[in-house]
Image: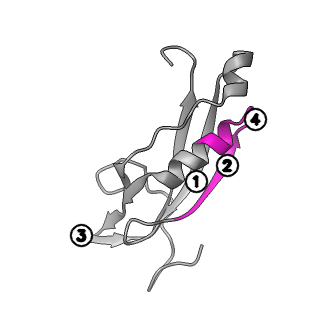
Amino acid sequence: PAAGRGGAVPVSAAFGDSDGPRFVRRVLPQYPEIARRRGREGRVVLRLVIGVGGELKDAAVVEGGGHGFGEAALEAARASAYAPAVRGGRPVECAAMLPVRFSLKGS
């Protein structure tokens, strides 16, 4: 992604850390029915780019997937709302990794 005014996109921001991006409203993914029927569980890692206004600029599956997990995780990420990362007291565009676990226990 293109960097915002004046600099590179920080890629080491940890999602949910005090200065990293965070959820304002988190939408949980729906468990894919085909995976549920087959008894499948899995883990997906998303790479999210959050803009200075908290907008989701990009979302991609970088690890995992299959059985509909990647699509479900992306759909939930796109429906969620975010607050941007902060550096030096100012919001900044950043990229952060978000792991999403799909487990049948308790679902």
Q: Which residue has dot 4 on it?
A: 66
Q: Which residues are magenta?
A: 57-72
Which amino acid, by three-letter code, is at mark 1? Arg
Which amino acid, by three-letter code, is at mark 3? Gly
| Nearer to us in this view, 31 or 101 | 31
Q: Which residue has dot 3 on it?
A: 89
Using the rendered image of the protein, determine whether residue 48 is visible from the camera's viewpoint: yes
Which amino acid, by three-letter code, is at mark 4? Gly
Residues under numbered marks 2 and 1 in contact, where contact means CB atoms less than 8 Å apart: yes
| Nearer to us in this view, 53 or 15 | 53
Residues under numbered marks 3 and 2 in contact, where contact means CB atoms less than 8 Å apart: no
Q: Quadrant of the N terminus?
A: bottom right
Residue at point 73% right, 26% down?
34
Tell me the mark number nearer the camera, choosing from 3 and 1: 1
Which residue, as the protein is rendered here, is positioned at the far bottom?
A: 6
| Nearer to us in this view, 96 or 88 | 96
Which amino acid, by three-letter code, is at mark 2? Val
- Tell me if mark 4 has few (under 14), some (14-19) or many (20+) residues whose alpha carbon lies within 10 angstroms of its own: few
Residue 5: percent from left, percent from top: 44, 85
Compute the Cα span from label 1 to label 4: 17 Å
Name which of mark 3 and mark 4 comes first in the sequence.
Answer: 4
The image's mark for residue 24 is: none
Q: Which residue has dot 2 on it?
A: 62
Residue 103 versus residue 68 in the image, above or below: above
Q: Is residue 17 left or right of residue 48?
A: left
Q: Is residue 16 left or right of residue 48?
A: left
